[in-house]
Image (cartoon, rainbow, N blue to C red):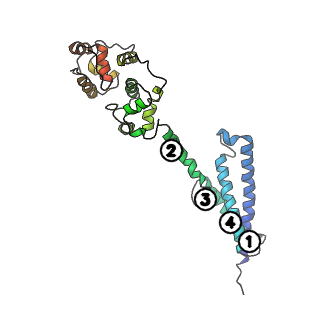
């Protein structure tokens, strides 16, 4: 003689199926209202404080619960109509627990959601990658990136300094500058993105012209090297090193006019050498 499961288990399975059908009707109606009204696409709070995605997740999980209860009814024998209050109570409690876990995005409810949610969460990373000009740009020196994108290196150097980004030279990579400034390579490139072609300086425009336009309205004459470095957001030690590399010996308290006269260049040449890595004045 075959042992049949107690009728109570069949009532629980039937109660779960019955309550699942009712819950699916509610979530299905909510999805219809949201999609018909366009509230889900407008980014507002949705219906009853739940977004379109939340209602869709509930509908998916409840659908799985419904089919699981049908399989349980078939496996336990002849379906019965649930009459025991305990069966209705257990079914309602089970669905309430599943709904709560779904809204909080906790397992095991999340195990029942479609796998394409993982693709949705991966999209921000793809968008971040597209913020770079080309694959592998993070490892290239900024000077190389600038040439690839048709940027004037003088403007790139000034733009990085105006953004408050610390770097030694345009030979630094986007990644190294990002690490030094505790930010991302995408954020570093964003500081110079506006210099991409066709927003280029005219070919005849020199580095001194660009620096002079950048500091238009600033009184340069009579300023010390230290004051100019501060105005250009260039660390003092880096400014002195750039001046020495350009053949201009200077101390922090030397006036730019004196450095220019001693070196046989103009005051704007001093400022350009201080701002631009590798600048060479025409003597």
- Secondary element at tag 4: helix
Closer to us: 24 or 47: 24
- Secondary element at tag 3: helix
Q: CA distance from mark 1 to mark 4?
A: 14 Å
Closer to us: 13 or 127: 127
- Taking the view exactly as shown, the residue that stands out farthest to the bottom is 1
Q: Nearer the viewer, mark 3 or mark 1?
A: 3
Does residue 107 lie above or below 175 as drawn? below
- Secondary element at tag 2: helix
Question: Could you classify mark 2 by the number of other residues whose Cα lies within 10 Å: few (under 14), some (14-19), or many (20 or more)?
Answer: few
Q: Residue at x 45, y 22 (%)?
A: 200
Label 3 or label 4, whichever comes before in sequence order: 4
Are circles 2 and 4 on residues that touch, CB within 8 Å?
A: no
Circle number at residue 125: 2
Q: Is residue 239 left or right of residue 100?
A: left
Q: Nearer the viewer, mark 1 or mark 4?
A: 4
Q: Nearer the viewer, mark 2 or mark 1?
A: 2
Question: Could you classify mark 3 by the number of other residues whose Cα lies within 10 Å: few (under 14), some (14-19), or many (20 or more)?
Answer: many
> From where the camera sits, is residue 235 visible?
yes
Does residue 149 lie above or below 52 as drawn? above
Label 3 or label 2, whichever comes before in sequence order: 3
Circle number at residue 11: 1
Question: Could you classify mark 4 by the number of other residues whose Cα lies within 10 Å: few (under 14), some (14-19), or many (20 or more)?
Answer: some
Residue denoted by label 3: 109
Label 1 or label 4, whichever comes before in sequence order: 1
Which quarter of the rendering shows the N terminus? Answer: bottom right
Q: CA distance from mark 2 to mark 1?
A: 48 Å
Label 2 or label 4, whichever comes before in sequence order: 4
Residue denoted by label 4: 68
Q: Nearer the viewer, mark 3 or mark 4?
A: 4
Label 2 or label 1, whichever comes before in sequence order: 1
Label 3 or label 1, whichever comes before in sequence order: 1
């Amino acid at each position: 003689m075959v042992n049949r499961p107690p009728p109570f288990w069949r009532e629980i399975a039937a109660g779960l199926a019955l309550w699942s059908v009712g819950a699916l009707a509610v979530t299905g109606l909510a999805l219809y209202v949201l999609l018909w009204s366009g509230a889900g696409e407008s980014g507002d709070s949705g219906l009853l404080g739940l977004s379109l995605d939340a209602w869709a997740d509930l509908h998916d999980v409840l659908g799985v619960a419904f089919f699981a209860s049908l399989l349980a009814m078939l496996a336990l024998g002849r379906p019965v109509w649930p009459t025991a209050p305990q069966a209705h109570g257990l079914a309602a409690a089970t669905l309430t627990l599943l709904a709560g876990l779904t809204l909080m995005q906790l397992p095991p409810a999340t195990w029942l959601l479609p796998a394409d949610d993982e693709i949705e969460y991966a999209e921000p990373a793809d968008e971040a990658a597209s913020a770079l000009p080309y694959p592998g740009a993070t490892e290239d020196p900024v000077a190389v990136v600038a040439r690839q994108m048709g940027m004037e290196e003088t403007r790139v150097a000034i733009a990085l300094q105006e953004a408050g980004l610390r770097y030694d030279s345009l030979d630094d990579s986007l990644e190294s500058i990002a690490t030094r400034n505790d930010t991302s390579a995408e954020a570093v490139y964003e500081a110079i993105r506006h210099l991409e072609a066709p927003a280029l300086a005219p070919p005849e425009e020199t580095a001194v012209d660009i620096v002079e336009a950048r500091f238009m309205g600033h009184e340069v004459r009579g300023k010390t090297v230290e004051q100019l470095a501060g105005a250009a957001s260039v660390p003092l030690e880096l400014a002195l090193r750039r001046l020495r590399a350009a053949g201009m010996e200077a101390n922090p308290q030397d006036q730019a006019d004196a450095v220019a006269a001693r070196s046989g260049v103009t005051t704007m040449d001093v400022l350009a050498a201080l701002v631009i890595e590798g600048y060479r004045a025409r003597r």
